[in-house]
Amino acid sequence: MWKQRSPGQSSFNDYNTFPLPQTQRVQPSYAHGPTFHTQQPLVTGTSVLGIKFDKGVMIAADNLASYGSLARFRDIQRLHPLGQHTLIGVAGDMSDYQWLQKELDALLREEDALALTDSHPSLSPKNIYQLLSNLFYARRSKMNPVWNAVLVGGWDKVKAESFLAYVDLLGTTYTAPTLATGFGAHLAQPLLREAYEAKAGIDGTGPLLTQEEAEKVLEDCMKVLFYRDARSINKFQIATITAEGSTISDSKSADTYWAFAEGLRGYGAQTQ
Amino acid sequence: MLSPSPSLSLLLSNLNEFRNSYDSDNTTFSPQGKLFQVEYALEAVKQGSAAIGVRSATHAVLLTLKRSTGELATYQKKLIRIDDHVGVAIAGLTSDARVLSNFMRQQAMRDRMTFGRAIPVGRIVQSIADRAQTNTQEYGRRPYGVGFLVIGQDETGPHLYEFSPAGTAFEYYAHSIGARSQSAKTYLEQNFESFESASLAELINHGLSALNDTLQQDKSLSVANTSVAIIGPADPAIEDIQHSAAARRGYFRVWENEGVDGLLRAWRRSRGEPEDGPQEEAAPDTAAAAGETTEGQQPSAEQAQTAEGSENAPPGAPAGGEDIDMEQH
């Protein structure tokens, strides 16, 4: 008896008729190796801050996308409008953020197309926030998180009030009149609360900050973050959402003071 | 036997009169540009008992005539709650209605889950219209044999839509579908201009008058055969808000059996009729026991298939009305 090679082992037979006819097999999902999920963020954005004021809500984020500790991309906008009255500020993985932008823009475009037929108002800030919290929790439950922390700011037209809420890669959700992600939650949130409660009181029943006051406290907080957060730069934008709609400021910087650095000793390049 | 007997060939030629070479496949147009299967499906809707829909600036109301398949059967429910803010009245094949209304419930729940909002009414109707249209264009399928009147309210106010098995979804100020619905349409066309500013009570009275016009000569509206569904703020003068949380919240609620009695009385008062209704209605059981043999008494094969039965059957056990509501967040 003569031994024939099994067809799976070779594309050639003993008579060199080439190629051997082969059945096209369906490639199994593991054919290209194991499936990898996002296990760490790569290009990241740092803190996002949010505060309610008397006529709406403001969200601030700097323009940096870091590659590890390298300040890699210095002109990235991390504030993204979703329709007229909603805006998100995003920290964490910037590629996941870009995916999120694409998905949400597609959804809103679809809603706008449907609204052409029935004139129904588009998704409210609350609707979008509900969607995001479902999405983030579902993805973390698949061990494949969307690696971001997001502030959703908006104006609820039905209730005629501002909206501000937080959702992150674990699906954690909460809402407060002042919010901050990442380092900002440690460095800026106390300052935001202090300014907010100084007027509104601890129970929030008093008057809210004016637009100018809110902008001032956000700029102060961005300065503190620039001083103390090594993943930040002194170039940031502030978005304002009111009943009239949302606007995003041009990039700006805070006045900083570095004269004290001259006297610092103990690390860095020094001649004496 | 070399040739068919004359009587048999006569029978065959008679059969061919009813046969249509363009109706065995719903995807093939006839030379006249018709899709016969779709037209037959529209006929199935006309076999079902009547359903009326009316709408004002604040309310939307459905009114239906229920049938029962026989003396021992309950009256078939014609009104289905989809969500707090949407409900439908059906005419045609009940089993097809169940498939479509389950799909509508899924759509409504999906919007509640993902967006935390009540689905816009026009979109939920369009979603079933799209499904029905697919059935008119794909080989090997059949159209749905049921038509809906859909009422609902959303951020743009109350709405009334008609869904038909042809795959269309149109919005109306007032509309009627089902058996003898043309009579109701005549009434609605004469009166619809006053509907926009009508109160809930006036709107229901108009709807009941239209529904009354679809009845056979010797029949009348009764607590057994009439059911009414309302969306919009409750009117405590005519609705029993004590027993309906949905009514208190202005959600979709169905009034039938004892629940519809107050509405019927108010309607008869408004027409200057005796409030208790025609006297023969007082003893329908004796009439049935006496062996009343009108044409609907024995359900025909067609009626059995519509599964809505006959309007002539006596009142059966009360069909359980749904009065569930979801918490609005």
Image: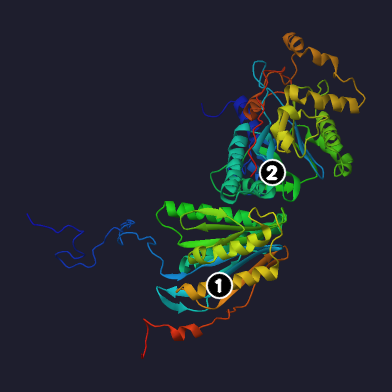
Crowding around mark 2 (Cα neighbors within 10 Å: few <14, some 14 to 19, many 20+) is many
Kind of residue sitting beneath label 2: Phe
Looking at the image, can residue A109 be seen? no
For the C terminus of chain A, give its image quadrant.
bottom left
Along the line of sight, the residue nearer the viewer: A69 or B283: A69
Crowdedness of circle 1 by 10 Å Cα count: few (<14), some, many (20+)? Answer: many
Q: Quadrant of the rendered structure where residue A67 is? A: bottom left
Q: How far apart are marks 1 and 2 (CA)?
A: 56 Å
Exactly how many numbered labels are in the figure? 2
Q: Is residue B216 left or right of residue A197?
A: right
Which residue is pictured at 60% across the width and 70% down the height? Answer: A218
Label 2 is found on which chain of the structure? B
> Which mark, residue A222?
1
Question: What secondary structure is found at the residue carrying circle 2?
Answer: strand
Image height of A197 relative to B267, above or below: below
Badge 1 amino acid: Met
Which numbered disc covers residue B163? 2
Q: Please provide percent x and percent y for residue A252.
A: 60, 79
Q: Where is residue B32 in the image (x, y as percent from the top left)?
A: 70, 49
Indicate left or right for A43 with A59 as reference: left
Q: Can residue A139 be seen by looking at this rendering?
A: yes
Direction left: furthest residue: A1
Asked whether the beta carbons under mark 1 and mark 2 sit within 8 Å of each other, the answer is: no
Residue B259 picture location, percent across and down:
75, 25
Viewer-proximal residue, B189 or B262? B262
